[in-house]
Amino acid sequence: MTRTPVPARYETAVDFTVRIPTRSGVTLGATLTRPVSDGRFPALVWYDPYRGAWDGQVGANARYFAARGYVFVNLHARGTGNSEGVHPDEYTEDETRDGYDAIEWLAAQPWCSGAVGMLGTSYSGFTCLQVAALAPPSLKAIAPAYFTDRRYTDDCHYKGGCLRGYYDTLTYGLNMVARNALPPHPLAVGEQWADLWEQRLREGEPYLLKWLQHPVEDEYWATGSVIGRYDRIKAAALLIGGWNDGYPTPPLRTFRALEAPKKLLIGPWSHAYGDVSHCGPRIHIHHELLLWWDRWLKDEDNGVDREPRVQIFAPEWEPPIRNRTVIRGEWHCADDLPPAAPYTWRFGADPSHSGWPREQGADRYEYRPAASPNGGIWDAGVPFRLPGDQRPDEALAINYTSPPLAEELLILGEPRFTAVVSASRPVMPLAVRLCDVGPDGTSVIVTRGLLNLTRRHGMDCPEPMPVDTPEPIMLDLEGAAWRFRKGHRLRLSINGSDFPNVWPTPLQGEVRLHLAEEDPTLVLPIWPTADPLPFDFLPSEAGVRAVATGDDPPAWRVIHDVLEDRLRFVMANGNEFVVSDRTPAEAWTRSTSRTTAAWPGAVVRAEATASLTSDARAIHLVLSLNVWLNDVPHYQQRWRQSVSRHLL
């Protein structure tokens, strides 16, 4: 198959007034970008609550595919954009059923060939899988990117049984409070626009309230999770992931489980399509998607289904410059994910131990929530989020370092850590980092894992740790591909901190790894069958964002308050997350999110503010929403909620 750019064939036209009925009686709004032609074309659906093209201003995705013979559909979730109803939470059953109904309606339109695909990044990647699990007959192919299949463990709310830190309240969750308060466009919905808007304001509720009300993996999180239901997905699936994205494991897990035609493409990318990701190499991702659609929606024999089904970029060691925009590494491929070929590293008696002083028969660390300021930021869209040199953080960790490698190691999968541990307090976290130590001693993160030890028996059944009583634990680190070069050393660095990515647990204390009970062990998933990729991806046609300089506002900073022994994570917009090594129970976020919607004669501004704080017993959330119409106050609402920590 030749990989050459596909030229545009059609002029395009946009209609943002499309109304789509659903079985519930709620009518969804959609913006269609169509080829200017009398022909019948497949439809591509991008489905989320982010108001895409709500005013007819469509993006490059829509123009690209419409010009090449597809109808691109920006579909608005109920209660958002130009849709009716209220959007009370993410990924509701009603939202997923609406997606099914919209697909079947689109397939029946006279301009449609009857074949529909779904695509998207993040939320719209999630909805691809969720709707596909309902198996709409007309949904022939999907291409989710940066998604999860298991919301409690791999979404942006909880990690390893710990509450996420900065992201929900400082960025996404708070942004949705403001965004969901915006009105539909009058030209799209007609004279009912004001009534629809008032319903949103009156009946809407912040997602954040529900997330905090469900601190364990209960049925709430099962809604929207397709794990255990993969067999229901019949559509051909192109799964796209990024090693510098916040969701590195779900594409691997989902690919293993799917029975439908499938392909896995994982680059070094952050939380954006591979043509615009801050972490390159950047490729022409629209071309890769077009090949997929042409094969499964137009039934063209273009050979894409005969390519290696697994196409993976494997990074390798390089100086960890935080704002670099190209990642060192190579592309590899295989017909399937590699079978088990474990490399087992037992290191309990390893003389290379460093960090906290070793005790008789045990290694220990003291819990300090701010002990990892160089670990980088969990990514869901922050521009420069890469970790730095790990050696400063390793000074407050247990570290095990291998001898120099006699041969290269290429891994792909989820490394597994096992140990026998005890804790001096009933609630303690364990954070594990696998690092690549270069010839100059620089330590670079490969992957990491986190476990609130109260969740050692399962995310749905927290139990206090019995004080000073050894118990076996197992922790799967996040999925990774990596090439360890000959002469480099492996390092496992263990403490309890993942700042600013998770909320601190409330108690000071120690965790011990018991060496006499059973050697702590790391099992690495070796990739012995990797081949070089037999082709070159087309390079991205998008411009590369300039590297931040000292004259730019920093994307984020970590500030140490020496007197109070607090670390402050501060974003460029002033939002902050603060933790204390001295009093871990006391942490807080303070943040503001602003957004606007406008058309001739009207400007709507929405501003949401949040304060999330904790003490030893509970977590407290205070939210406010203020809305202005043409600079006149229009609506105001407040929410307050306190929830028990529930061993968080």
Image: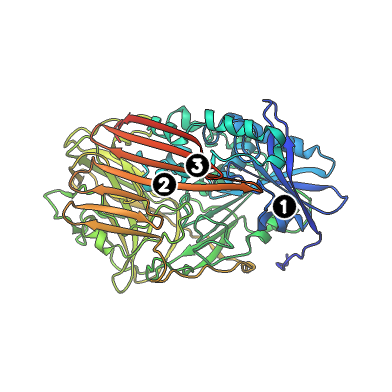
**Mark closer to the observer (2, 1):** 2
* C-alpha separation, residue under disc 2 versus residue under disc 1: 40 Å
Question: Upstream in the sequence, badge 2 or badge 1?
Answer: 1
| Residue hosting label 3 | 178
Disc ID at residue 584: none
Q: Percent from the top left, x then y, of residue 201?
A: 53, 32
Instruction: Kindly identify the amino acid type of the residue bearing the numbered disc 2.
Output: Thr
Q: Nearer the viewer, residue 483 or 169?
A: 169
Above/below status of 298 relative to 82:
below
Q: Say left or right for 207 vs 489.
A: right
Q: Percent from the top left, x then y, of residue 581?
A: 20, 49
Q: Residue furthest right?
A: 38
Q: Residue furthest bottom?
A: 440
Report if residue 337 is visible in the image.
yes
Task: Give the structural element (helix, strand or loop) at label 2.
Answer: strand
| Residue hosting label 2 | 592
Q: Percent from the top left, x then y, of residue 387?
A: 37, 61
* C-alpha separation, residue under disc 3 versus residue under disc 2: 9 Å
Task: Give the structural element (helix, strand or loop) at label 3.
Answer: helix
Q: Residue furthest top?
A: 24
Q: Nearer the viewer, residue 235 or 519?
A: 235
Q: Say left or right for 163 vs 29.
A: left
User: Residue at the spot x=28%, y=45% of the render?
Assistant: 430
| Residue hosting label 1 | 293
- The scheme the figure's colours follow is rainbow
Task: Give the structural element (helix, strand or loop) at label 1.
Answer: helix
* Quadrant of the snapshot with the N terminus: bottom right
* C-alpha separation, residue under disc 3 versus residue under disc 1: 35 Å
Q: Percent from the top left, x then y, of residue 485?
A: 40, 69
